[in-house]
Amino acid sequence: MKFITGLKGFFKRPLYVFIISAFTLTWILIIITKYIASVLVSVILGLFIIIFGGSLLFFSLFLFFVSFFKQINKMKWWFFLIVYIISLILSLFSNLLFRSIFSPTSDLFFIITLTVNQFFTAFFAFRLCMNSSTKVDDYLYKKEKSRIVTRIIEFLLFGFLNWWIIRITVTFFSYTPTVLLVTVILMLWIMFWINVCLLGVAIIRLIITKEFTAYLTLFFLLTLFYALYILVDYLYGAFFSTESGDPIYIVSSFIIDFLLFLYILGTVYSRVDYIKSKIKFLNVETIALFLIIMKIYVQVSKIVPKIVTLEWQILQAGGLFVIFVFFNLLFGIHSVITHKYKKKNEKES
């Protein structure tokens, strides 16, 4: 798949290996702090995370601005070393003399970075759902002798699974507080009508072109899983855990979020030539660093104590869901109309 090729190109660069490794370490340390009973150790580790994460943020910010004028991949190793030492000093002094760069007083900046992070996350989550479903369908389409039968089974099977999981979801959340149940039903209702719109376009396409868009039910199933992930990731602590410290929730959320982050970076790097041809004033390093900066700020900000009301958590989840649904509708219709099935002699992209 293209994003794997992009990831290989991304990790061939020692600079990004360092940034992602350091960011991953920060992420893991954030998880560890959830299980430390000693208040003193937890505070010390939290301060270390903020300083270390701050140095990584300053480092990425500096390289981001430099990338507009110079090619990052052509710079010497000593340049990056000097920049990181300066970034570490800035992070240390900003915490000792002023307030952390992740301070909760910078609400506006946090909201902006959170929104940008949500936008890219929702877009690439849509791409992952669509690409995965079309890959499966393209594979079934290649088998000429059983093409019709296997793809009808595909459509019916995943359609049944989608209905079954929705039923289980509604049953499960019917035993939760009313606010959460209403939120879930509203999300499922919106997704239902989006799916109806996409099915309508698929039927029109079938009548005009005689091509059956069998992958749609698998796409619906994958988007349902992601919608439930949004719900759990943002609202689990408020409704299911008294401390938001359940290890299954924290670790699974980290794994899903991290894999999606790698998918985003891999997809960006797989489109190097396209980016160069379409966006003259930006290069792939600039875009990658921008995404990394947004992710670092939002992720490390979680370690900074701040009161997040239930209404705000629902608003965050709702914002990400609305963006995701927007991509499902707009780009979903485009994908249904323009999707071309791969013949036997076509190579996998």
Image: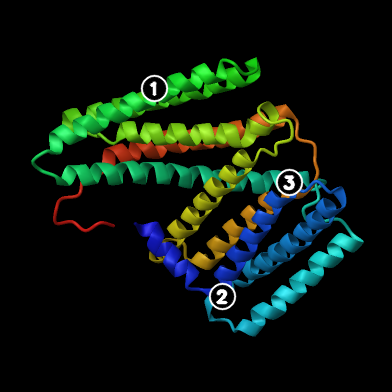
In depth, the one of 161 and 205 nearer the eye is: 161
Quarter of the image where the N terminus is located: bottom left
Q: Distance from label 2 to label 1 (Cα)? A: 50 Å
**Residue at label 3?**
35
Q: Residue at x 58, y 63 (%)?
A: 20
* Residue at figure coordinates x 51%, y 42% from the top left: 122
What residue type is disc 1 on? Answer: Trp
What residue type is disc 2 on? Ile
The label on residue 72 is 2
Q: Label 2: few (<14), some or many (≥20) within 10 Å?
A: some
Q: What is the spatial separation of the Cα atoms under label 3 and label 1, in whole angstroms?
A: 36 Å
**What is the crowding at mark 1: few (fewer than 14 residues within 10 Å), some, or many (at least 20)?**
few
**Which of these two is toward me, 200 or 5?**
5
Please give the residue where the numbered disc 1 appears in the rendered image: 164
* Residue 51 image point, x, y percent: 78, 62
Amino acid on which disc 3 is placed:
Tyr
Is residue 205 visible in this depiction of the protein?
A: no
Q: Nearer the viewer, mark 2 or mark 1?
A: 1
Is 21 left or right of 122, judged from the image as shown? right
Earlier-in-chain disc, 3 versus 2:
3
Residue 286 picture location, percent across and down: 56, 65
**3 and 1 marks in contact (CB < 8 Å):** no
